[in-house]
Amino acid sequence: MGIPSDVYDPAEVQPPSQRAATQEATLRRVAGRALAHAPAFRAALAAAGMRPQTLTLADLPRIALLRKETLPRQQAETPPFGGWLAKPLAEVRRIFVSPGPIYDPEGFDEDYWGFAPALVAGGFRRGDVVLNTFSYHFTPAGAMFDGALQVLGCVVVPTGVGNIETQVKALIELRARGIIGTPSFLAAVLDRVREQAPSSSVEVACVSGEMLPETLRRDVEGRHGLRISQAYGIGDIGLIAYECPQRSGLHLAERIIGEVVDPATGAPVAPGEVGEVVVTFLSEFYPLLRFATGDLSRLAPGGCACGRTSLRLERILGRVGDAVKVRGIFLHPHDLDRAIARHPEVTRYQAVVTRADRNDELTVRVEAESPAHLAEAVSQSIREATRLRAIVEVVSPGTLASTEKRLVDRRTWE
Protein backbone atom coordinates (compact mmCIF):
# COMPACT_ATOMS: atom_id res chain seq x y z
CA MET A 1 0.00 0.00 0.00
CA GLY A 2 1.44 3.38 -1.02
CA ILE A 3 1.71 6.60 0.94
CA PRO A 4 -1.53 8.69 0.80
CA SER A 5 -1.30 11.81 -1.36
CA ASP A 6 -2.07 14.05 1.63
CA VAL A 7 0.92 12.74 3.61
CA TYR A 8 4.12 14.80 3.37
CA ASP A 9 6.53 12.52 5.23
CA PRO A 10 6.37 8.70 5.18
CA ALA A 11 7.22 8.80 8.90
CA GLU A 12 3.68 10.04 9.51
CA VAL A 13 2.33 6.54 8.76
CA GLN A 14 5.11 4.44 10.30
CA PRO A 15 4.31 1.82 12.99
CA PRO A 16 4.22 3.37 16.49
CA SER A 17 7.02 1.07 17.67
CA GLN A 18 9.26 2.31 14.87
CA ARG A 19 8.44 5.91 15.74
CA ALA A 20 9.33 5.34 19.40
CA ALA A 21 12.68 3.76 18.47
CA THR A 22 13.49 6.61 16.07
CA GLN A 23 12.53 9.28 18.60
CA GLU A 24 14.63 7.65 21.30
CA ALA A 25 17.69 7.44 19.05
CA THR A 26 17.19 11.06 17.96
CA LEU A 27 16.77 12.17 21.57
CA ARG A 28 20.09 10.60 22.53
CA ARG A 29 21.88 12.14 19.54
CA VAL A 30 20.40 15.59 20.23
CA ALA A 31 21.22 15.30 23.94
CA GLY A 32 24.81 14.32 23.19
CA ARG A 33 25.35 17.44 21.10
CA ALA A 34 23.46 19.71 23.49
CA LEU A 35 25.53 18.48 26.42
CA ALA A 36 28.62 20.02 24.85
CA HIS A 37 27.13 23.24 23.48
CA ALA A 38 23.94 24.15 25.41
CA PRO A 39 24.59 24.77 29.13
CA ALA A 40 20.89 25.03 30.02
CA PHE A 41 20.21 21.61 28.48
CA ARG A 42 23.24 20.22 30.31
CA ALA A 43 22.01 21.61 33.63
CA ALA A 44 18.50 20.19 33.14
CA LEU A 45 19.88 16.73 32.42
CA ALA A 46 22.31 16.88 35.34
CA ALA A 47 19.58 17.94 37.76
CA ALA A 48 17.66 14.82 36.79
CA GLY A 49 20.78 12.65 37.15
CA MET A 50 20.73 11.51 33.51
CA ARG A 51 23.28 10.89 30.79
CA PRO A 52 22.62 11.25 27.04
CA GLN A 53 23.96 7.76 26.26
CA THR A 54 21.27 6.04 28.33
CA LEU A 55 18.40 8.52 27.94
CA THR A 56 15.05 6.90 27.09
CA LEU A 57 11.55 8.19 26.38
CA ALA A 58 10.45 6.77 29.71
CA ASP A 59 13.02 9.01 31.45
CA LEU A 60 11.50 12.27 30.22
CA PRO A 61 8.91 12.70 33.03
CA ARG A 62 11.80 12.79 35.53
CA ILE A 63 13.17 15.98 33.94
CA ALA A 64 11.86 19.30 35.27
CA LEU A 65 9.51 21.29 33.06
CA LEU A 66 10.86 24.33 31.22
CA ARG A 67 8.18 26.99 31.57
CA LYS A 68 7.71 29.69 28.96
CA GLU A 69 7.52 32.43 31.58
CA THR A 70 11.05 31.59 32.78
CA LEU A 71 12.64 32.08 29.35
CA PRO A 72 12.90 35.90 29.53
CA ARG A 73 14.89 35.64 32.77
CA GLN A 74 17.09 32.83 31.44
CA GLN A 75 17.75 34.74 28.24
CA ALA A 76 18.62 37.89 30.17
CA GLU A 77 21.07 35.94 32.35
CA THR A 78 22.60 33.98 29.44
CA PRO A 79 21.96 36.03 26.30
CA PRO A 80 20.60 35.70 23.78
CA PHE A 81 18.88 32.29 24.12
CA GLY A 82 19.25 31.32 27.77
CA GLY A 83 21.85 28.62 27.13
CA TRP A 84 19.57 26.45 24.96
CA LEU A 85 21.18 27.13 21.58
CA ALA A 86 23.31 24.12 20.60
CA LYS A 87 25.09 25.72 17.63
CA PRO A 88 27.17 28.89 17.15
CA LEU A 89 25.30 32.17 16.87
CA ALA A 90 26.63 32.51 13.31
CA GLU A 91 24.36 29.60 12.33
CA VAL A 92 21.22 31.54 13.33
CA ARG A 93 19.39 32.83 10.28
CA ARG A 94 16.94 35.17 12.03
CA ILE A 95 16.00 36.20 15.57
CA PHE A 96 12.33 36.91 16.23
CA VAL A 97 10.98 38.79 19.24
CA SER A 98 7.88 37.36 20.92
CA PRO A 99 6.07 38.99 23.86
CA GLY A 100 8.03 38.69 27.09
CA PRO A 101 10.31 39.54 25.38
CA ILE A 102 11.39 36.06 24.26
CA TYR A 103 14.00 35.75 21.51
CA ASP A 104 13.23 32.93 19.08
CA PRO A 105 16.07 31.71 16.83
CA GLU A 106 15.51 30.41 13.32
CA GLY A 107 18.03 28.06 11.74
CA PHE A 108 18.96 27.66 8.08
CA ASP A 109 17.23 24.28 7.71
CA GLU A 110 14.66 23.98 4.93
CA ASP A 111 11.20 24.45 6.48
CA TYR A 112 12.88 25.07 9.84
CA TRP A 113 9.54 25.55 11.63
CA GLY A 114 8.14 22.30 10.24
CA PHE A 115 4.73 23.36 8.87
CA ALA A 116 4.92 21.51 5.52
CA PRO A 117 3.13 18.36 6.81
CA ALA A 118 0.26 20.50 8.10
CA LEU A 119 -0.16 22.28 4.76
CA VAL A 120 -0.05 19.09 2.70
CA ALA A 121 -2.64 17.52 5.01
CA GLY A 122 -4.71 20.68 4.53
CA GLY A 123 -4.73 20.36 0.74
CA PHE A 124 -2.03 22.87 -0.28
CA ARG A 125 -0.13 21.81 -3.40
CA ARG A 126 2.74 22.89 -5.68
CA GLY A 127 1.87 25.89 -7.82
CA ASP A 128 -0.89 27.20 -5.57
CA VAL A 129 -0.99 30.97 -5.15
CA VAL A 130 -1.33 31.49 -1.39
CA LEU A 131 -1.92 34.62 0.69
CA ASN A 132 0.01 34.43 3.97
CA THR A 133 -1.72 36.92 6.25
CA PHE A 134 0.38 36.25 9.34
CA SER A 135 2.74 38.95 10.56
CA TYR A 136 6.26 39.06 9.13
CA HIS A 137 7.26 41.60 11.78
CA PHE A 138 8.90 40.67 15.13
CA THR A 139 7.05 37.37 15.72
CA PRO A 140 7.81 34.28 13.59
CA ALA A 141 4.29 33.29 12.45
CA GLY A 142 4.68 34.69 8.92
CA ALA A 143 8.08 33.07 8.44
CA MET A 144 6.81 29.75 9.80
CA PHE A 145 4.28 29.34 7.00
CA ASP A 146 6.39 31.11 4.39
CA GLY A 147 9.17 28.53 4.71
CA ALA A 148 6.74 25.62 4.43
CA LEU A 149 5.01 27.11 1.39
CA GLN A 150 8.34 27.57 -0.37
CA VAL A 151 9.30 23.94 0.28
CA LEU A 152 6.00 22.81 -1.23
CA GLY A 153 6.53 24.98 -4.32
CA CYS A 154 3.61 27.30 -3.65
CA VAL A 155 3.59 30.90 -4.87
CA VAL A 156 3.61 33.05 -1.72
CA VAL A 157 1.90 36.42 -1.45
CA PRO A 158 3.33 37.79 1.84
CA THR A 159 0.50 40.12 2.80
CA GLY A 160 0.94 40.10 6.58
CA VAL A 161 -1.65 41.61 8.89
CA GLY A 162 -3.92 44.54 8.03
CA ASN A 163 -4.55 46.44 4.77
CA ILE A 164 -7.64 44.33 4.23
CA GLU A 165 -8.76 46.14 1.07
CA THR A 166 -5.40 45.50 -0.60
CA GLN A 167 -5.50 41.88 0.55
CA VAL A 168 -8.94 41.41 -0.97
CA LYS A 169 -7.86 42.99 -4.26
CA ALA A 170 -4.75 40.78 -4.41
CA LEU A 171 -6.74 37.64 -3.65
CA ILE A 172 -9.26 38.36 -6.40
CA GLU A 173 -6.82 39.52 -9.08
CA LEU A 174 -4.20 36.83 -8.41
CA ARG A 175 -6.86 34.09 -8.22
CA ALA A 176 -5.32 32.75 -5.01
CA ARG A 177 -6.23 29.13 -4.27
CA GLY A 178 -5.08 29.22 -0.63
CA ILE A 179 -5.03 31.56 2.32
CA ILE A 180 -3.36 31.34 5.73
CA GLY A 181 -3.97 33.29 8.94
CA THR A 182 -6.03 33.47 12.12
CA PRO A 183 -9.65 32.26 11.86
CA SER A 184 -11.13 35.68 12.59
CA PHE A 185 -8.98 37.57 10.07
CA LEU A 186 -9.55 35.01 7.33
CA ALA A 187 -13.31 35.23 7.89
CA ALA A 188 -13.12 39.03 7.56
CA VAL A 189 -11.09 38.86 4.34
CA LEU A 190 -13.33 36.23 2.74
CA ASP A 191 -16.49 38.12 3.67
CA ARG A 192 -15.09 41.19 1.95
CA VAL A 193 -14.13 39.12 -1.10
CA ARG A 194 -17.68 37.84 -1.35
CA GLU A 195 -18.97 41.41 -1.41
CA GLN A 196 -16.76 42.27 -4.40
CA ALA A 197 -16.65 39.09 -6.51
CA PRO A 198 -19.38 36.63 -7.51
CA SER A 199 -17.24 33.63 -6.52
CA SER A 200 -13.95 33.06 -4.73
CA SER A 201 -10.96 31.19 -6.11
CA VAL A 202 -9.95 30.07 -2.60
CA GLU A 203 -10.28 26.32 -2.08
CA VAL A 204 -8.08 25.70 0.98
CA ALA A 205 -7.29 27.64 4.15
CA CYS A 206 -5.04 26.86 7.08
CA VAL A 207 -5.59 28.64 10.38
CA SER A 208 -3.58 28.97 13.57
CA GLY A 209 -2.97 31.41 16.41
CA GLU A 210 -6.55 31.36 17.70
CA MET A 211 -9.23 28.88 18.69
CA LEU A 212 -11.30 27.69 15.73
CA PRO A 213 -14.91 27.24 16.93
CA GLU A 214 -16.71 24.61 14.88
CA THR A 215 -19.58 27.05 14.39
CA LEU A 216 -17.20 29.49 12.69
CA ARG A 217 -15.64 26.75 10.55
CA ARG A 218 -19.01 25.47 9.36
CA ASP A 219 -20.18 29.00 8.63
CA VAL A 220 -17.10 30.04 6.62
CA GLU A 221 -16.83 26.74 4.74
CA GLY A 222 -20.54 26.76 3.92
CA ARG A 223 -20.65 30.34 2.65
CA HIS A 224 -17.35 30.32 0.76
CA GLY A 225 -17.09 26.72 -0.45
CA LEU A 226 -13.61 26.01 0.87
CA ARG A 227 -11.87 23.64 3.27
CA ILE A 228 -10.33 24.88 6.53
CA SER A 229 -7.63 22.95 8.39
CA GLN A 230 -5.88 23.76 11.66
CA ALA A 231 -2.21 23.84 12.65
CA TYR A 232 -1.04 24.17 16.25
CA GLY A 233 2.36 25.74 16.79
CA ILE A 234 4.26 28.08 19.10
CA GLY A 235 6.91 30.70 18.45
CA ASP A 236 9.62 28.89 20.40
CA ILE A 237 9.41 25.63 18.46
CA GLY A 238 7.13 25.83 15.43
CA LEU A 239 4.68 23.08 14.49
CA ILE A 240 3.47 20.85 17.33
CA ALA A 241 0.35 19.24 15.85
CA TYR A 242 -1.95 19.51 12.85
CA GLU A 243 -5.28 18.40 11.50
CA CYS A 244 -5.80 15.75 8.81
CA PRO A 245 -8.86 15.55 6.51
CA GLN A 246 -10.62 13.30 9.05
CA ARG A 247 -10.71 16.13 11.61
CA SER A 248 -10.42 13.61 14.42
CA GLY A 249 -7.91 15.61 16.42
CA LEU A 250 -4.49 17.19 15.94
CA HIS A 251 -1.72 14.75 14.98
CA LEU A 252 1.52 15.30 16.89
CA ALA A 253 4.33 16.28 14.52
CA GLU A 254 7.24 13.88 13.97
CA ARG A 255 9.70 16.62 14.91
CA ILE A 256 8.69 16.68 18.58
CA ILE A 257 7.96 14.37 21.51
CA GLY A 258 4.64 15.41 22.98
CA GLU A 259 3.23 14.77 26.44
CA VAL A 260 0.05 15.74 28.29
CA VAL A 261 0.92 16.27 31.95
CA ASP A 262 -0.35 17.50 35.29
CA PRO A 263 0.69 21.20 35.30
CA ALA A 264 1.51 21.06 39.01
CA THR A 265 3.72 17.95 39.02
CA GLY A 266 4.82 17.45 35.42
CA ALA A 267 3.70 13.81 35.61
CA PRO A 268 1.77 12.33 32.66
CA VAL A 269 -1.99 12.32 33.15
CA ALA A 270 -4.15 9.25 32.58
CA PRO A 271 -5.52 8.68 29.06
CA GLY A 272 -8.51 10.92 28.41
CA GLU A 273 -7.68 13.37 31.20
CA VAL A 274 -7.05 17.06 30.55
CA GLY A 275 -3.49 18.26 31.11
CA GLU A 276 -0.84 20.67 29.89
CA VAL A 277 0.80 20.10 26.52
CA VAL A 278 4.56 19.62 27.00
CA VAL A 279 6.97 19.37 24.08
CA THR A 280 10.55 18.17 23.69
CA PHE A 281 11.97 19.65 20.48
CA LEU A 282 14.09 17.06 18.65
CA SER A 283 16.39 19.70 17.18
CA GLU A 284 20.18 19.73 17.13
CA PHE A 285 19.93 23.51 16.74
CA TYR A 286 17.61 24.63 19.59
CA PRO A 287 16.76 21.53 21.65
CA LEU A 288 14.21 22.70 24.19
CA LEU A 289 13.65 19.98 26.77
CA ARG A 290 10.13 19.38 28.17
CA PHE A 291 8.90 22.82 27.21
CA ALA A 292 5.58 23.55 28.94
CA THR A 293 3.37 25.35 26.43
CA GLY A 294 0.71 26.50 28.92
CA ASP A 295 -1.98 25.03 26.64
CA LEU A 296 -4.49 22.50 27.94
CA SER A 297 -5.60 19.48 25.95
CA ARG A 298 -6.10 15.72 26.16
CA LEU A 299 -5.14 12.81 23.95
CA ALA A 300 -7.77 11.57 21.51
CA PRO A 301 -8.67 7.88 21.86
CA GLY A 302 -8.05 5.24 19.21
CA GLY A 303 -6.47 5.48 15.80
CA CYS A 304 -7.25 7.74 12.85
CA ALA A 305 -8.78 6.60 9.56
CA CYS A 306 -6.34 8.82 7.64
CA GLY A 307 -3.54 6.28 8.20
CA ARG A 308 -1.32 8.50 10.32
CA THR A 309 -0.17 6.67 13.42
CA SER A 310 0.93 9.48 15.74
CA LEU A 311 -0.85 10.39 18.94
CA ARG A 312 -3.50 13.07 18.57
CA LEU A 313 -4.59 15.98 20.72
CA GLU A 314 -8.37 16.37 20.77
CA ARG A 315 -8.08 20.16 20.52
CA ILE A 316 -6.75 23.03 22.60
CA LEU A 317 -9.14 23.44 25.53
CA GLY A 318 -7.72 26.52 27.28
CA ARG A 319 -4.70 27.86 29.11
CA VAL A 320 -2.85 27.10 32.32
CA GLY A 321 -2.50 30.05 34.70
CA ASP A 322 -3.26 33.67 33.93
CA ALA A 323 -2.03 34.11 30.35
CA VAL A 324 -4.53 34.21 27.47
CA LYS A 325 -4.12 34.37 23.71
CA VAL A 326 -5.64 37.43 22.04
CA ARG A 327 -5.60 37.79 18.25
CA GLY A 328 -2.81 35.24 18.09
CA ILE A 329 -0.62 36.98 20.72
CA PHE A 330 -0.04 35.74 24.26
CA LEU A 331 -1.11 38.32 26.82
CA HIS A 332 0.24 38.04 30.37
CA PRO A 333 -0.84 40.12 33.37
CA HIS A 334 2.76 41.26 33.83
CA ASP A 335 2.68 42.78 30.33
CA LEU A 336 -0.35 44.84 31.34
CA ASP A 337 1.30 45.70 34.68
CA ARG A 338 4.26 47.14 32.76
CA ALA A 339 1.97 49.29 30.62
CA ILE A 340 -0.21 50.54 33.48
CA ALA A 341 2.88 51.36 35.59
CA ARG A 342 3.57 54.24 33.18
CA HIS A 343 0.45 55.96 34.54
CA PRO A 344 0.73 56.46 38.32
CA GLU A 345 -2.69 58.10 38.41
CA VAL A 346 -4.25 54.66 37.76
CA THR A 347 -5.01 52.96 41.09
CA ARG A 348 -6.44 49.67 39.78
CA TYR A 349 -7.28 48.04 36.47
CA GLN A 350 -8.98 45.02 34.95
CA ALA A 351 -8.62 43.68 31.41
CA VAL A 352 -11.43 41.62 29.91
CA VAL A 353 -11.19 39.60 26.69
CA THR A 354 -14.46 39.02 24.83
CA ARG A 355 -15.45 37.94 21.35
CA ALA A 356 -17.76 39.89 19.03
CA ASP A 357 -18.46 39.23 15.35
CA ARG A 358 -15.74 36.53 15.32
CA ASN A 359 -13.11 38.97 16.60
CA ASP A 360 -11.29 39.14 19.92
CA GLU A 361 -11.84 42.36 21.83
CA LEU A 362 -9.66 43.59 24.68
CA THR A 363 -11.27 46.08 27.05
CA VAL A 364 -9.26 47.56 29.91
CA ARG A 365 -11.04 49.42 32.70
CA VAL A 366 -8.80 51.69 34.78
CA GLU A 367 -9.61 53.54 37.99
CA ALA A 368 -8.40 57.13 38.14
CA GLU A 369 -9.41 60.52 39.54
CA SER A 370 -8.45 62.50 36.42
CA PRO A 371 -9.84 60.90 33.25
CA ALA A 372 -8.85 63.66 30.82
CA HIS A 373 -6.82 62.17 27.94
CA LEU A 374 -5.97 59.14 30.11
CA ALA A 375 -7.79 56.55 28.01
CA GLU A 376 -5.82 57.42 24.89
CA ALA A 377 -2.51 57.45 26.76
CA VAL A 378 -3.14 54.10 28.47
CA SER A 379 -4.26 52.56 25.19
CA GLN A 380 -0.99 53.64 23.58
CA SER A 381 1.05 52.20 26.46
CA ILE A 382 -0.77 48.87 26.18
CA ARG A 383 -0.16 48.85 22.44
CA GLU A 384 3.57 49.43 22.95
CA ALA A 385 3.88 46.78 25.68
CA THR A 386 1.75 44.05 24.13
CA ARG A 387 1.26 44.95 20.43
CA LEU A 388 -2.50 44.69 21.05
CA ARG A 389 -5.08 47.39 20.57
CA ALA A 390 -7.32 47.86 23.59
CA ILE A 391 -10.49 49.77 24.35
CA VAL A 392 -9.72 51.71 27.53
CA GLU A 393 -12.49 52.85 29.85
CA VAL A 394 -11.71 55.19 32.76
CA VAL A 395 -13.91 54.57 35.82
CA SER A 396 -14.12 56.13 39.28
CA PRO A 397 -11.94 54.79 42.11
CA GLY A 398 -13.70 51.99 43.98
CA THR A 399 -15.52 50.67 40.90
CA LEU A 400 -13.33 47.58 40.60
CA ALA A 401 -13.27 45.13 43.48
CA SER A 402 -9.82 44.37 44.87
CA THR A 403 -10.57 40.64 44.67
CA GLU A 404 -11.18 40.63 40.91
CA LYS A 405 -8.60 39.12 38.57
CA ARG A 406 -6.54 41.56 36.52
CA LEU A 407 -7.04 39.57 33.31
CA VAL A 408 -10.33 37.82 32.59
CA ASP A 409 -11.21 35.71 29.54
CA ARG A 410 -14.97 35.71 28.87
CA ARG A 411 -14.88 34.15 25.41
CA THR A 412 -16.77 30.97 24.60
CA TRP A 413 -15.70 28.49 21.92
CA GLU A 414 -18.74 26.67 20.58
Image (tube, rainbow, N blue to C red):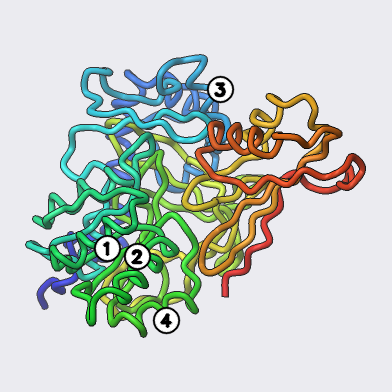
Q: In which quarter of the image is residue 225?
A: bottom left
In the rendered image, the quadrant that contains the C terminus is bottom right
Q: How far apart are marks 3 and 4 (CA)?
A: 42 Å
Q: Name the residue under label 3.
A: 73
- Residue 3 in percent (x, y) is at 13, 71
Q: Mark 1 points at which residue?
A: 168
216 to 68, vertically: above or below: below
On residue 253, the disc is none
Q: Count every numbered label the image shows and give the total.
A: 4
- Residue 201 in percent (x, y) is at 18, 74
Q: Which residue is drawn at 42% across and 71% down?
A: 249
On residue 218, the disc is 4
Q: Left or right: where does residue 361 sit relative to residue 368?
A: left
The crowd level at tag 2 (other Cα within 10 Å; few <14, some 14-19, many 20+) is some
On residue 189, the disc is 2
- Residue 404 in percent (x, y) is at 83, 48
